[in-house]
Image (tube, coloured by chain):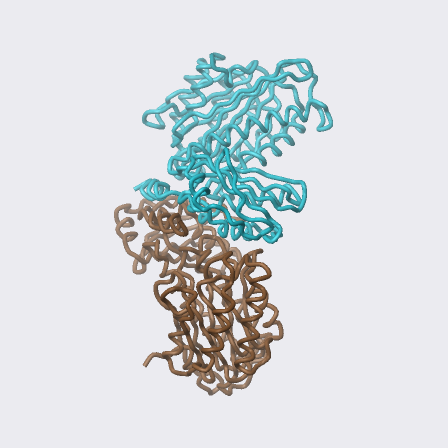
Chain colours: A cyan, B brown
Amino acid sequence: MIKNLTSVRGIKCWGAHIGIKSMRRDLALIFSEVPASAACTFTQNQVVAEPVKISRRNVRDGKAQAIICNAGNANACTGEQGRLGAEAMVETAAKALGIEKEQVIIASTGIIGEPFPTEEVVKGIEENISKLSDDPKAGSFAANAILTTDTFAKEGFLEFELDGKTVHIGGIAKGSGMIHPNMATMLSFIVSDIAIEPGVLQKAVKECVNRSFNMITVDGDTSTNDMVAVLCNGLAGNKPIESEADESYLLFREKLEEMMIHLAKLIVSDGEGSSKFVEYRVSHAPSEEIARKLVRAISDSSLVKTAMFGRDPNWGRIICAGGNAGVPFDYTTVDLFLGCETELVQVLDKGRPVAFDRNQVKRLLRESHLRVHLNMNEGEAESTGWGTDLTTDYVMFNSVYTT
Amino acid sequence: MIKNLTSVRGIKCWGAHIGIKSMRRDLALIFSEVPASAACTFTQNQVVAEPVKISRRNVRDGKAQAIICNAGNANACTGEQGRLGAEAMVETAAKALGIEKEQVIIASTGIIGEPFPTEEVVKGIEENISKLSDDPKAGSFAANAILTTDTFAKEGFLEFELDGKTVHIGGIAKGSGMIHPNMATMLSFIVSDIAIEPGVLQKAVKECVNRSFNMITVDGDTSTNDMVAVLCNGLAGNKPIESEADESYLLFREKLEEMMIHLAKLIVSDGEGSSKFVEYRVSHAPSEEIARKLVRAISDSSLVKTAMFGRDPNWGRIICAGGNAGVPFDYTTVDLFLGCETELVQVLDKGRPVAFDRNQVKRLLRESHLRVHLNMNEGEAESTGWGTDLTTDYVMFNSVYTT
């Protein structure tokens, strides 16, 4: 039997088709039977969807009990009509669930700038609250109901011992890689039965998001609706984690990071217009921040991405992209390795080209899972990120999208 | 008869084929008979080619008399061998021309990371200095000798009255738009016979570059070799411009900006893998800096670029890209217009979608010269930039490049 969101104690889910999208489920409900510690991260885009504004406000007290998400309409650039629709979404859910409005987190994903279908969403919530269930099938329904152009549902589940108790983390995500980001908001909802104080949870979430969802390349753009929400309802019965110094904290953060990286990699794997999955690692950096910026600059570069598509061991493009990362970068001290999951070949040694076998490397780059490793030889910090190649299909998909 | 670099008083040029590239001219020489005020701007990339390091040093005194540029090899990521090659380039030119080494500016463009062909370049300089000529043909030779993947030479010439004298500005440039930027350094060399103090010239150059070459999209990446160099030798005999308050200063700056915008637009027009030339204008902004950042964020967005390729009036992508510009951006106050050179259609009115005729706009977007105009309704500043679309050809070109 599969385990997912609903395998976490006290979590009930549902995913319904309420008619915003023509064929697929488009309303997800996630409910914790008891109030939970809650932490979110939101899009950095200056243009922010209506549900993001409301959820930002509602999560401020560090508590929440429900996550409601519709797909098919982003409720972004919708003005007053959209604001009222989002408020109605919260009010309807709170009333139907018998909880305070401040306990409801909402999200939307879909087309930007079209009037929000308030009536359908309100009616959909009212009609489906009673179907909330802890059957894993209901968890899968929810995982499917947040999708837009995604080609598969993204789920994860972890079970581990903490403080003598068995605890669980379940998560779902959406966002089909680099394809249609203006239609494909990056969303992730994660629930756990661990007991943890909201302030500590917020720190863990921020740190884990920085090492996972923030390390996947989505065209360099962030959408108007991006959101990661985590609820921890404490039903595992562990001694509540109250500080980063608690022994249990590091274990929880490690597991949360594992979950987020798992979901982030699934998102990258669903890039419809991409042909390759590429892992970028910068090691021995002076700081994690510098390593992270280098990973992002290199994995975001159109020229690096097209080289990956073309199986081209073009290290000049990688070094040049590193030079554009906005951090100190001395190519004369770096080692660079290219290859696939099982084999890496060194192409630069302290900035000097290595006489590598070009045909061997081209053969490795034919694999669908590639790796790029830059060793800065300057410190102990490192960062890893994931991206896709840039293909002719990507351009075709995106150029014919609304026309 | 055409007028170009050599139509400027005291300027002699040559462009030779010395064998770095198989078929095309690959060594350009530009010489002023008298020492000139000189100002340069250089790449912001942390990885800097050897000629950039030397030219940065040599232009520090605000004076120069020669510009020597080779194509086919970037002399970047070449280590000590490259540094010695660049020094040899300067020494050879200085000796052959009978001037101080500090009077020589050098540039290179071509493949990154291959050993610099010092011997060919040194020999090429020695053999071609004697051919320096003020025949416009020699100016064209120079314009052609700095090209790499460019499909045509980019030249400009302006003649105007200043302080009762006829003065001239001649310029050349290279960099084939968004194609092969790691092979296609953006270079521009501009000469004038105006008399102007180095400090004032430096200010004018910086400001004009910000409004021209810095406003064209080259994949968001800057290469290791980018350089703009301007020499003004004073042979026009005008009263030297000594301060930004001088009456003549504004006129000169206006003409210099006109020249740089002309050359920058030619660079964009030479995007081999592009099918459209797009002008982006942000008006009524609170500051020019904000307008500039918005233009760059929108014109750099892969999603906006693919929409242009697909003739898709997808205003959501434009607004979303604006939200990622890193400046305050309130979409509810903006008006947005899309169209071609001759006709613009309003699609957003204070953030609200206008019921425009989608088929009419799609028809306009079929043109090869498009315009996007965002009115912020917030101030008096504005900025304009130029870019291309993102096409399937772009991906093909760049993925099969070195393999």
Give the side of residue A249 with respect to residue A261, left or right.
Answer: right
Rendered view: A380 above or below A258 = below
Considering depth in this image, is A255 or A277 the residue closer to the camera? A277
Rendered view: A48 above or below B40 = above
Residue that extends furthest to the right in the rendered view of this protein? A245
Considering depth in this image, is B225 or B178 the residue closer to the camera? B225
In which image quadrant can residue A170 be found?
top right
The residue sitting at 46% across, 42% down in the picture is A361
Measuring from the top left, give residue B302's x and y in whole percent. 42, 47
Tell me if residue A79 can be seen.
Answer: no
Measuring from the top left, give residue A291's x and y in whole percent. 60, 43
Give the side of residue B51 with respect to residue B216, left or right.
Answer: right
In which image quadrant can residue B351 be found?
top left
Measuring from the top left, give residue B217's x and y in whole percent. 44, 56
In which image quadrant can residue B281 be found?
bottom left
Tell me if residue A62 can be seen.
Answer: yes
Considering depth in this image, is A35 or B332 the residue closer to the camera? A35
Quarter of the picture containing the N terminus of chain B is bottom left
Give the side of residue A217 with respect to residue A59, left or right.
Answer: left
